[in-house]
Amino acid sequence: MRGHIWFLAQLFIQPELHALGIGKELLRRSRAHGEQAGARIFSVTSSTSPSAQALYLRSGMFAFGIGYVMLGPVGGLQRLPGPEGSLTRIDDLAPWQDAVAALDRDLFGAERRQDHAMYLRHERVLGIEAASFGLERRGELYGYGYVDASGWVAPLAAREPQGQLPLLRLAGDWLAARSVENGRMWVLSLNPTIMRALLEGGWRIDQWTFLKATAPFGKFDRYHPSGGLLL
């Protein structure tokens, strides 16, 4: 649960036990927990499995986006425009968490303070070098992003769709400085700005999933989640 948005993170059933109603019952119990907590939107990222598709459709969650796992050269990010004009780089998001929460409320639909606390501890917890960064304009947070040395770039958000491009450039420069040659992102079809930039930079689609919900939410044309878990 993030605000009024409920998200089913993972659901697995032994293959030999499919079609026995186990998935339906697990989903019912999980959803009941969300209803008791005041959820108004129910969502999930679904595989391409027909049985999984049917399960979530019967629960009222319909696809409103496709999530593409994309892989490609860091050099493609470095060809994007960097911060210009009144935009100034932020090298650490830790002091900006109230502003980050406000931006998340606007772009995602809920605050995600516990998720950002996890990202800020990423290096200490997972042992992989990581960084947070952002852009400010006249003292106001314009956008933010995270990157780690495995090449993963996310989450990332900006007040305007095109504002995502200089953030991607900052991530690319950080990776290149650590001799990381290839990056990875989970990009929604609802975000043509990032999708177009990556394809033009030589990235390719590796696999895809479906973002489903009982009602559309979020401004995903300018908000890039961490991956299929939407965190």
Image (tube, rainbow, N blue to C red):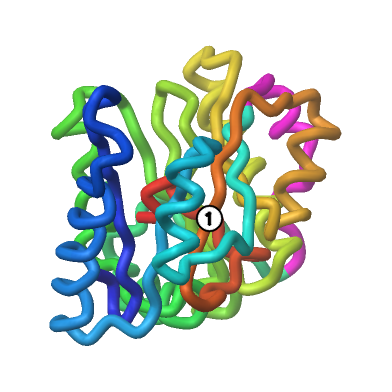
Q: Is residue 82 magenta?
A: yes
Residue 148 as seen in the image, left or right of residue 79: left
Give the magenta range. 71-85
Residue 189 as seen in the image, left or right of residue 6: right
Instruction: Indicate the secondary structure of the residue bearing disc 1.
Output: strand
Residue located at (48% from left, 18% from top): 178
Q: Is residue 120 placed above or below 180 in the rendered structure?
A: below
Q: Is residue 206 placed above or below 52 in the rendered structure?
A: above
Which residue in the structure is indicated by mark 1? 211
Residue located at (58% from left, 33% from top): 69
Give the crowd class for mark 1: few <14, some 14-19, many >=20 residues within 10 Å: many
Q: In what quadrant of the picture does the C terminus appear?
A: bottom left
Three-letter amino acid code of the residue under disc 1 = Leu
Residue located at (50% from left, 49% from top): 53
Tell which of 68 and 130 is nearer to you: 68
Tell which of 14 and 105 is nearer to you: 14
Q: Does any portion of residue 89 appear in the rendered image? A: yes
Quadrant in the picture for residue 195: top right
Quadrant in the picture for residue 187: top right
Total number of numbered labels? Answer: 1
Residue located at (58% from left, 79% from top): 138
Tell which of 61 and 193 is nearer to you: 61
Of all residues, the one furthest to the front in this rendering is 20
Q: In what quadrant of the picture does the N terminus appear?
A: bottom left
Residue 97 percent across, percent down from the top left: 30, 69
Q: Does the magenta stretch include residue 66?
A: no
Residue 25 percent across, percent down from the top left: 20, 57
Residue 119 percent across, percent down from the top left: 28, 47
Q: Does any portion of residue 227 appear in the rendered image? A: no
Residue 128 percent across, percent down from the top left: 28, 24
